Amino acid sequence: MFRVTIKKSGHTFEVAEGDTVLAAALAAGYTLPYGCRNGACGSCKGTVVEGHVDFGNHQPYTLTDSEKAAGLALFCCARPQSDLVIDAREVAGVGEIQVKKLPCRVQAIERPAADVVVLRLKLPANERLQFLAGQYLEIIMRDGKRRAYSMANPPHDDEFIELHVRNMKGGAFTEYVFNTMKEKDILRFEGPLGTFFLREDSDKPMLLVASGTGFAPIKAIIEHAFHAGIERPMVFYWGGRRPQDLYMRDLAESWAREHPNFSFIPVISDAEPEDAWTGRTGFVHHAVLEDFPDMSGHQAYVCGAPVVVEAAHRDFTTRAGLPDDEFNSDAFTPSVDPLKAAT
């Protein structure tokens, strides 16, 4: 048994042999930032100030050898080898929400794009899922494997749980969704999970950035902000390779028409001549930097492929002065290929 102290707060907790720092912190009631819980997204990265850890199994791109040498670790994978002092943010507002394992029924299957399915899932009549806008759940497959999907509906609109699923070749769950799933099928899931959600205690203008189906949790955050009457300026950048990748563009454009504090900027990286695209081009996070070279007074919410989230974090904090604790992210981590965008 080792003792871990969180430097900023002074909170302490014990970690049993074989447990990770994150699992023990959550069990003790202290929520550290996390996303995938399997070393693929980097959301839980922090510093080991004192002591030693076994870094555990993780994707090489989420924690490099040079970062390890500098004292960084992924707390979802790191197992203490001594008492520790760690430098990590604590996230308020999550701990009191109950994580449940529940069945659900497939209520509707919609295809807003050739490679995207929108699922609407119905809970049992006597169940309700409390969650924060932006959190995710894990679908539990029959073989016990899990697939993480962000909830695209805001908490107040909870008649159905809405998931956005992109077709990933070779993905066990996506193959089922696109080729076999039918309405009234029964699924099981665990949730809500994650620390990506709207920080309502701030008055800073918000920059929201999504690539592909990273739109799902951003959609939940935006719709919750509207429902809650939040009047902070919001600028939403949605990136895709081609215009059809922005599969709910009409919805985002309607938000911009209806809410004076909201702006929508679509960004396309690989438009073809037949697309006749006349809007912004290039990488989505570059467009944000062009418009906001000084982010020191802003708050950012970024969701998409790990490469997009990592690049945005690096450039927003080092080039544009965004405070590190104002960068909120959710990196989608597919089981097929971690270097590609996921659902």
Image (cartoon, grey):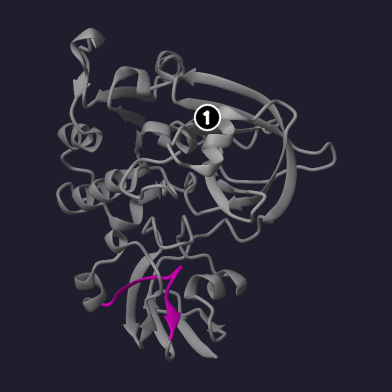
The residue at which mark 1 appears reads as 223
Whether residue 110 is in magenta: the answer is no
> x%, y% of residue 247?
42, 21
Amino acid at pointer 1? Glu
Residue 327, percent from left and from top: 34, 51
* x and y percentages locating residue 153 in the rendered image: 58, 32
Q: Quadrant of residue 237?
A: top left
Q: Name which residue lies at 84% across and 36% down.
A: 125
Residue 234 appears in which quarter of the rendering?
Answer: top left
Q: Is residue 115 left or right of residue 72?
A: right
Element class at badge 1 = helix
Per the image, is 76 magenta? yes
The residue segment tinted magenta is: 71-80
Expressed as whole percent of the image width and height from the top left, the position of residue 224 reads 54, 34
Locate the N terminus and report the quarter of the image it occupies.
bottom right
Q: Is residue 227 visible?
A: no
The C terminus - image quarter: top left
Identify the image quadrant of residue 152: top right
In percent of the image, x 58 and y 54: which residue is there?
145
| Residue sitting at x 41%, y 49% | 333
Is 93 or 315 nearer to us in this picture?
315
